Amino acid sequence: MPDHESDAGCVTATTGDAPGMKRILVIGSGGVGKSTFARRLAGGTGLPLFHLDALYWQPGWIKSSREDWLAKVDQLVAGERWIMDGNFGGTLERRLAACDTVIFLDLPPWVCLWRVLRRRIRHHGQARPDMTAGCHERLTWDFVWWILSYPVRRRPAILHRLATMHAGQRVHRLRDSRAMEDFLQSLPSAPPLSG
């Protein structure tokens, strides 16, 4: 996978000559800003947006059954046009196989943790807009550990997998907030980043 790293901290790799973005996957650590970025991306592209957290979690933080979740993901990836944001490693391969573009938001864990703390305060006692109603914003030590350990435990496997994307798929690795903003500003009509 050829890489090009700009001064803005954006690594862009394009495998093949992919047509326009129609099936976009936004991935990255918890707190990195996937949902906010995806919302702006949807505004700039006109593609339908699916927040995987809102589809997976039932009110009260009840997990979907594995069968229901796999069926839902299969239904989503069968669509011709979409943006999906979220991790859910158990379905990542299905989503990677179906997308034409992956945007990996790869910011430092301290930035992600700060954003999660800010989000927790902003949405205290309520569900955030990209989450299922009845799933009030929460912060657990397990989630904090997941964010802090992401660069060592998750990131290497994701980078390895992204390096093996097939011809015709685009991979954008955005490594700081400026690179995220620059990417969104390159779209025809992206709304301003606020989150």
Image: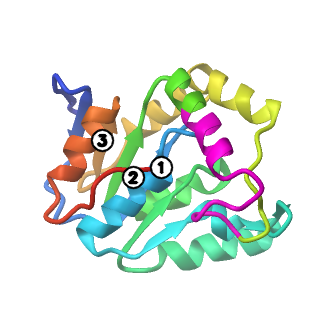
Mark drawn on residue 166: none
Q: CA distance from mark 2 to mark 3?
A: 8 Å
Image quarter for residue 56?
Answer: bottom right
> Which one is in front, 170 or 148?
148
Image quarter for residue 113?
Answer: top right
Residues at discs 2 and 1 in contact (Cβ within 8 Å): yes
First to last magenta residue range: 115-132
Residues at discs 1 and 3 in contact (Cβ within 8 Å): no
Q: Secondary structure at mark 3?
A: helix
Q: Secondary structure at mark 1?
A: helix
- The residue positioned 73% from the left and 52% from the top of the image is 137
- The residue positioned 74% from the left and 35% from the top of the image is 143
User: Label 2 is placed on what type of residue?
Assistant: Phe
| Residue, disc 3 | 180
Q: Is residue 58 left or right of residue 173?
A: right
| Residue, disc 1 | 34
Indicate the position of residue 153 as horizontal and vertical percent values.
Answer: 64, 24
User: Label 3 is placed on what type of residue?
Assistant: Met
> Which one is in front, 54 or 66?
54
Residues at discs 2 and 3 in contact (Cβ within 8 Å): yes
- The residue positioned 49% from the left and 72% from the top of the image is 77
| Residue, disc 2 | 37
